[in-house]
Amino acid sequence: MIFPFLPHNHRIKKTGKTRSTRLSRTKSAAPHEQPTDVRLGRLVRLLMEHATVVVSGTKIAQEISSNRTEVWRLIQQLRGLGVDVAGHPATGYQLKSVPDLLLPEILGPLVRGTIFDNQLHHFYKIGSTNTAAMAAAAEGAPEGSVFLAEEQTAGRGRGSNSWESERSAGVYCSVVLRPALPPSDVLVITLAAGLAVRAALVQVEPRVTVDLKWPNDVLIKGKKVCGILAEMHAEVMRVRHIVVGIGLNVNQKSFPKEIENEATSLRMETGSECSRVEVAAALLKSLDGEYRALVEQPDAQKPILRRFAEQSSWARGKKVYIEDSAPRIEGTTEGLDAQGFLQVRTAQGLQRILSGTVRAK
Amino acid sequence: MNQKELKELIEFLIEKDIAEFELERGDVKVKIKRGGQHTVVQARAEAPYAAVTVPQAVAPAVAASAASVPAAVPAAEPVPEENLHIVKSPIVGTLYEAPSPGAPPFVKVGDMVEVGQVLCIVEAMKLLNEIESDVAGEIVKKLGGNGQPIEYGQELFAIRAKK
């Protein structure tokens, strides 16, 4: 059961604060939440700065204000995350390769100048980055706050769907946005997020052909490589905050039986391992561009709708049905309407699809 | 539409520099005219409005009246003797009464709810919008059906506010 996390947001006390720092560490953590030890980031940075030499446990302990036993524990934790560290307490430690972790120390410098600059919150393990981001937003987390996790134990999709989030294999992140737009103008953000993911994937891995399925599933050869789930807290005329959650499959080698026909990863498509850090950086940069265009440019919705129609093979002329629709809606897609809703030509006429999963017939 | 929402609407119109605005939905009619030396707010609804102050630099004259519009339109539904608070949808989408299929609904008729309590979800294009109650009170009526399409501003719940 994944979705029951949702209603819990209302119990979170709303303080009048508009800004609060260190959200991920100061608030009491949910059962599955493991906020990242700040020393881990420092340890990684230290090892990266001394990439060619062995650094002694004593020196590391001094540099990160800790002791040798703690350093040993942190090194073990890094190894658990797939980082190749040579050495042991007696000899000192050395990185064998650049760690592909989404730590603020590593990812941060790559997203300078974006709305996410200096706002990365990293977790080893979390229930759901969306749930954490919604809770933080309700407490006043500023626009651009990013919640990244190496692993989600309760990654969420639509309805009762979950999101498979194998440790350190994908990019699981949720961002907090506070657009000064009325809620009705902001819906296209979910389309824009799909466009952002597609652009990032094409940039990092030009060999793959990336398709979009309304509203924002990102597909490679018809299989899902990325899912997006957005949540909004709004009044009639004003959006308080939106959280856009993105689950991107990068280095998974396989998926559980139930979803193996539907899911894929970059690695499974290209045959080679991909840098998650590079993917995450490209993603946040392209999301930053899409979001700024949406909130800063007048009439920004039109180019989003136009680009979606250009980049999605599903937008027009595709025979589809809507999953779980009663009565069943099936027909041929006929583009998006002015608000971004999918139009399907059925035997009964042109129907506007507000939500739901589109499937090929 | 309560006074706070009306105020927000006016602020929004000022921000976007919209001179004239008219909205008619069910038994609510709002007409706002800005510009020049006068800002006129006319409203007739299920609940009478107190005077609304319009934040505008050019000393606005505000007229808020519950009976200034001629030829009163009869309410679509029999208006209850009490003033019920109506919760409306901020977006177009699909209404969900429960957090997931098969789960019990967020609220039932007769439930007491608090301010900020989630009443339902309206989803549009995989954007989930939790609709919260903006008053404390008792759910008197559900005005939308589970899984049904909801229009912008459509009434979702009637709540008898706690005194």
Image: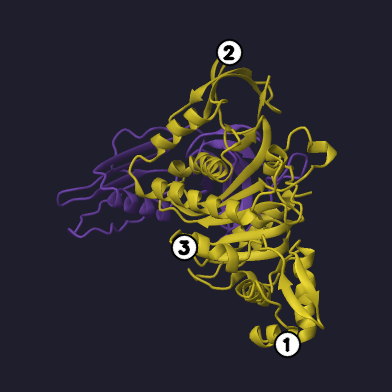
Chain colours: A yellow, B purple
Q: What SS does tag 2 mark?
A: loop
Both marks 2 and 1 on one chain: yes
Contact between marks 2 and 1 (CB within 8 A): the answer is: no
Residue under label 1, please give it: A58
Q: Which mark is residue A112?
A: 3
> Where is residue A232 drawn, in percent x and y?
55, 50
Mark 3: amino acid: Arg
Q: Is residue B89 visible?
A: no
Which residue shows up at 78% across the image and 37% down it?
A: A259
Graded by Cα atoms within 10 Å as few (under 14), some (14 to 19) or many (20 or more), the crowding at tag 2 reads few
Residue nearer the viewer, B64 or A353: A353
Q: What SS does tag 3 mark?
A: loop
Mark sitting earlier along the chain (2/1)? 1
Q: Please name which of the two marks, 2 or 1, marks the residue nearer to the observer.
A: 1
Outermost residue, top side: A347
Both marks 3 and 2 on one chain: yes
Which residue shows up at 77% across the image and 85% down it?
A: A68
Both marks 3 and 1 on one chain: yes
Gap in angstroms between the C-alphas marked 2 and 1: 75 Å
Q: Quadrant of the C terminus of chain A?
A: top right
Graded by Cα atoms within 10 Å as few (under 14), some (14 to 19) or many (20 or more), the crowding at tag 1 reads some
Number of numbered discs visible in the structure rendering: 3
> Where is residue A109 drawn, in percent x and y?
51, 65
Q: What SS does tag 1 mark?
A: helix
Q: Please name which of the two marks, 3 or 2, marks the residue nearer to the observer.
A: 3
Mark 1: amino acid: Thr
Q: Is A217 placed above or below A239 here?
A: above
Contact between marks 3 and 1 (CB within 8 A): the answer is: no
Q: Is residue A32 left or right of residue B130?
A: right
> Where is residue A116 drawn, in percent x and y?
50, 60
